[in-house]
Image: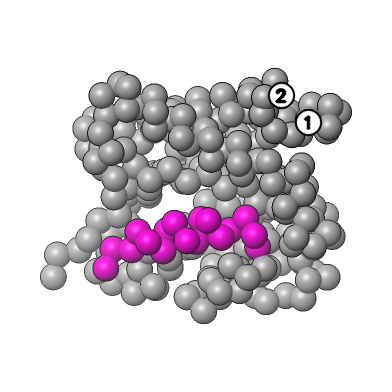
């Protein structure tokens, strides 16, 4: 049987973040039955400026108490996000070869917010919820730009941007079904420490990351992530419709 190839370009804050999203993508795209899938990952590290741009947006938006368009800081974040998507797409094209990117490929851009939610529903407060809406608009604008440049939908990847609160570790905590008191209302560093026993994630070996995080991401735990992490839901819904088989 010929293996199905899946090309996934990933922009993330660090190695553990990218590894977690890789595992999530594999589970969502294949129901954890990946024996007939060849996964081609491309870490587009040089494009990751989203975290800096989000921090700058929040600082200005909080001061002005204006989180949505047409505020200048919202416009700037959206413009920056379009540039980041465009740069990541260019790098993805270089990796795959010009003209070889298709609608079956995925371009995933992630970042940690480093901001804590007291409870999951806090995600829908303006200061947090505005981020996903602005980034969704940036994706629309990216496709518009590429369309005007002559690209058709068959030669553009599925673009997904996701900002996690407070960090990617919330996905692991949800997959492990930890009580809310251990997932929400705590600092990002405390969440990391509770999962890995350290805040210096560069010291974690691949075996330790597998044991403490990746092994918990399964088809069954996707339900827990979907239930407990609001920012994951569009990501999960979108990838689940892009399964290989």
Residue 71 in the image: state x and y as whole percent: 71, 24
> Residue at left 80%, top 62%?
119
- Residue beneath disc 1: 66
Is the magenta region chiefly helix, strand or loop? helix
Q: Magenta stretch containing residue 62, yes or no?
A: no
**Which disc is residue 229 wearing?**
none
* 99 up-or-down from 35: above or below: above
Choose the circle earlier in sequence order: 2 or 1: 1
Residue at the farthest bottom position: 220
Q: Quadrant of residue 98?
A: top left
Residue 46 in the image: state x and y as whole percent.
50, 31
Q: Residue at x 26, y 68 (%)?
A: 245
Residue placed most toward the observer, 97 or 29: 29
Quadrant location of the N terminus in the rendered image: bottom left
Is 242 covered by the magenta stretch? yes
| Residue found farthest to the front | 70
Residue holding disc 2: 71
**Helix, strand or loop status at disc 2:** loop
Q: Does the CB distance between marks 2 and 1 fall below 8 Å?
A: yes
Q: Viewed as shown, does residue 105 lie left or right of 44?
A: left
| 38 lies above or below 152 | below
Q: Is residue 122 visible from the viewing direction of this image?
A: yes
SS type, badge 1: loop
Front residue of 143/69: it is: 69
Magenta span covers which residues? 229-245
């Amino acid at each position: 049987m010929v293996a199905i190839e899946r090309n996934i370009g990933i922009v993330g804050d660090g190695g553990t973040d990218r590894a977690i999203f890789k595992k999530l993508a594999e589970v969502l795209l294949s129901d954890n039955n990946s024996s007939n899938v060849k996964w081609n990952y491309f870490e587009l590290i040089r494009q990751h400026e989203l975290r800096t741009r989000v921090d700058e947006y929040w600082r200005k938006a909080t001061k002005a108490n204006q989180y949505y368009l047409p505020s200048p800081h919202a416009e700037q974040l959206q413009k920056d996000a379009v540039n980041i998507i465009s740069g990541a797409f260019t790098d993805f094209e270089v990796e795959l070869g010009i003209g070889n990117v298709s609608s079956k490929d995925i371009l995933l851009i992630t970042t940690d917010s480093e901001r804590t939610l007291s409870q999951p529903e806090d995600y829908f407060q303006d200061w947090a919820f505005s981020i996903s809406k602005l980034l969704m608009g940036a994706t629309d604008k990216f496709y518009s730009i590429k369309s005007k440049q002559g690209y058709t939908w068959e030669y553009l990847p599925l673009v997904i941007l996701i900002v996690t609160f407070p960090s990617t570790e919330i996905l692991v905590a949800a997959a492990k079904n930890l009580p809310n008191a251990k997932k929400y209302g705590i600092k990002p560093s405390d969440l990391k420490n509770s999962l890995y026993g350290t805040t210096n994630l560069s010291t974690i070996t691949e075996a330790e990351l597998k044991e403490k995080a990746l092994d918990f991401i399964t088809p069954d735990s996707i339900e827990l992530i979907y239930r407990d992490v609001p920012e994951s839901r569009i990501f999960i819904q979108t990838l689940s419709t892009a399964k290989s088989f």
